[in-house]
């Protein structure tokens, strides 16, 4: 066994997982810390090849070839998005007084102000993260790894100081209260793991490019350095939920948000068709919704994931998901997951889009982390269809939430128009079901902000058309939440 324990001395960790920090749009940081970042820290401690001063460097090749470890880390640390700011930018020469002369930065003459987007800082309650390779024999390389570990000062950004310990045993006291992130092909937590035989060579190439070209060299120029591997995160292992998303999918190209009813109908038809092709009849009743008796049952939800919630969001549907209730049986869950992930096209009336399983990259709207956050306040990205005719008040919304398996809300606010940028503003004909049985009997629909007493884990879908993707919400994290949502029968 080989174990590497990282202890965050300040209880905080800051790192840019995918380059989104420079855009200012990052909402969550990298967690757990990636294996490639850990390997890079070992490389930086003593260099590679001829640059090594203390060790031979062969221990790095041993680390690179180990593959994905089990990662023991806090399940849900606090993610704090940091405010962007301007700092003094170095200016070494002034060629000409006038147009070429830079503006002053506060009291600093002849200096420019550069915009810095520091990204997301993660605060952890448990300060240790342990990487475990159970089948690794590190006897030969143990001393060299420990020498390097002693020289590692930080992980990610320089304001994340760490202490690293290399061992051949696992201390249960360090991992008892932590989540074990396990490599899993069906997991939704993506962790970058080195490619054996390629990662170190690419790091050396990137370093040599930086020596000759300077700061213009970016890690985005070396995609090999980011090898995302699926891990089973805490959301995948949570058995207390009423249900779970069994497949996260990406759409290429994006589909206009007004086509949401067509997208979810095509996703439902494609999933059922592929299920029948793979496993034959009969279809599980949770997929089609027929054969239930009584009230309060839950069926599959076919979700369209739009680009919503940011200043320049346009509402285009960039992803999709299939949700199943927990009580439909593990065999059905596994079969539906396999059927949905094997889809390659969504086709409908004037609709054709390539669909593929989410692999850890792509637009933010298609990422599970966008919809699976915890928040006290949720806002509809897609309008919610009322479950009954009549006015919407707090008791009625509480009934909606009960039917959807959510806790009772404290307050809400509703509107006919979208409440966040990019949220879908639909015509009644784009909400009403197209079948003749239901045409002309459509219930009203509204955009809603709802506040709960405690943070609720997403995805949150409310209202009477949950199975068709209506009522899908995004988390809202205002700076001041005291007056952000009205109470009772508030309507705007």
Image (spheres, rainbow, N blue to C red):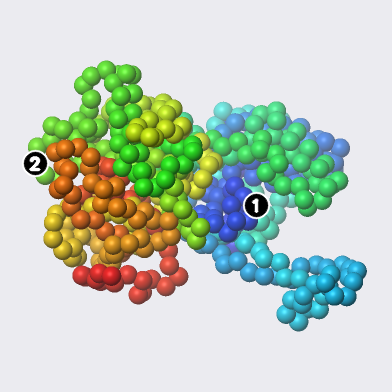
Left or right of 29 on screen, residue 471: left
Instruction: Provide residue 343's location: percent of width, then percent of height.
Output: 40, 27
Report, in whole angstroms, how far the alpha carbon at label 2 lies from the one at label 1.
55 Å
Please determine whether, in this image, residue 326 is positioned above or below residue 430.
above
Assign the C terminus to one quadrant of the image. Answer: bottom left
The residue labelled by disc 1 is 155
Task: Report the side of 138 relative to 260 (left or right).
Answer: right
Residue pointed to by mark 2: 294
Q: Residue sitting at 53 percent across and 49 percent down?
A: 31
Q: Which quadrant: the N terminus?
A: top right
Q: Residue at x 70, y 54 (%)?
A: 153
Residue 203 against residue 162 in the figure, above or below: above
Quarter where residue 300 is shown: top left
> Few, some or many C-alpha atoms within 10 Å of disc 1 (few <14, some 14-19, many ≥20)?
many
Q: Is residue 278 left or right of residue 125?
A: left
- The single residue placed furthest to the right in the displayed view is 95
Dividing the picture into quarters, in which one does residue 147 lie?
Answer: top right
| Callout 1: SS | loop
Disc 2 vs disc 1: Cβ atoms closer than 8 Å? Answer: no
Q: Nearer the viewer, residue 261 or 477?
A: 261
**Residue 227 at least partly seen:** yes
Q: Nearer the viewer, residue 235 or 151?
A: 235
């Amino acid at each position: 066994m080989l174990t590497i324990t990282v202890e965050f001395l300040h209880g905080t960790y800051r790192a840019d997982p995918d380059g989104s920090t420079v855009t200012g749009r990052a909402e969550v940081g990298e967690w757990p810390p990636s294996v490639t970042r850990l390997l890079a820290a070992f490389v930086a401690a003593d260099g590679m090849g001829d640059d090594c001063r203390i060790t031979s460097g062969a221990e790095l090749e041993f680390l690179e070839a180990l593959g994905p470890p089990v990662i023991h880390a806090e399940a849900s640390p606090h993610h704090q998005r940091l405010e962007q700011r301007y700092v003094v930018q170095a200016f070494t020469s002034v060629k000409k007084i006038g147009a070429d002369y830079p503006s002053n930065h506060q009291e600093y003459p002849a200096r420019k102000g550069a915009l810095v987007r520091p990204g997301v800082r993660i605060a952890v309650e448990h300060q240790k993260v342990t990487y475990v390779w159970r089948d690794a024999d590190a006897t030969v390389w143990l001393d060299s790894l420990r020498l390097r570990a002693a020289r590692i000062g930080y992980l990610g950004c320089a304001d994340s100081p760490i202490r690293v310990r290399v061992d051949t045993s696992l201390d249960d006291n360090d991992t008892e209260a932590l989540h074990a992130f396990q490599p899993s092909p069906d997991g939704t937590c993506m962790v970058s793991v080195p490619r054996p035989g390629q990662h170190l060579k690419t790091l050396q190439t990137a370093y040599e490019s930086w020596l000759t070209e300077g700061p213009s060299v970016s890690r985005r120029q070396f995609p090999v350095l980011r090898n995302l591997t699926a891990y089973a995160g805490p959301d995948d292992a949570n058995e207390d939920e009423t249900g779970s998303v069994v497949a996260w999918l990406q759409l290429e190209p994006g589909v206009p948000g007004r086509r949401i009813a067509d997208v979810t109908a095509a996703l439902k038809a494609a999933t059922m068709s592929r299920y029948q092709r793979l496993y034959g009849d009969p279809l599980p009743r949770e997929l089609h919704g027929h054969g239930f008796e009584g009230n309060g049952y839950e069926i599959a939800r076919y979700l369209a994931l739009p680009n919503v919630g940011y200043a320049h969001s346009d509402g285009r549907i960039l992803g999709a998901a299939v949700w199943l209730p927990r009580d439909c049986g593990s065999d059905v869950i596994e079969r539906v997951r396999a059927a949905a992930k094997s889809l390659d096209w969504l086709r409908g009336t004037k609709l054709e889009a390539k669909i593929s399983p989410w692999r850890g990259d792509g637009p933010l709207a298609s990422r599970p982390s966008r919809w699976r956050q915890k928040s006290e306040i949720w806002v509809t990205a897609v309008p919610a269809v009322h479950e009954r005719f009549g006015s919407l008040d707090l008791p009625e919304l509480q009934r909606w939430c009960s039917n959807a398996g959510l806790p009772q809300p404290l307050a809400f606010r509703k509107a006919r128009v979208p409440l966040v940028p990019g949220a879908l503003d639909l015509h009644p004909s784009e909400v009403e079901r197209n079948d003749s049985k239901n045409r002309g009997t459509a219930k009203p629909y509204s955009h809603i902000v709802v506040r709960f007493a405690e943070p609720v884990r997403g995805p949150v879908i409310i209202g009477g058309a949950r199975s068709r993707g209506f009522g899908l919400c995004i988390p809202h994290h205002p700076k001041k939440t005291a007056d952000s949502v009205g109470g009772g029968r508030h309507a705007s």
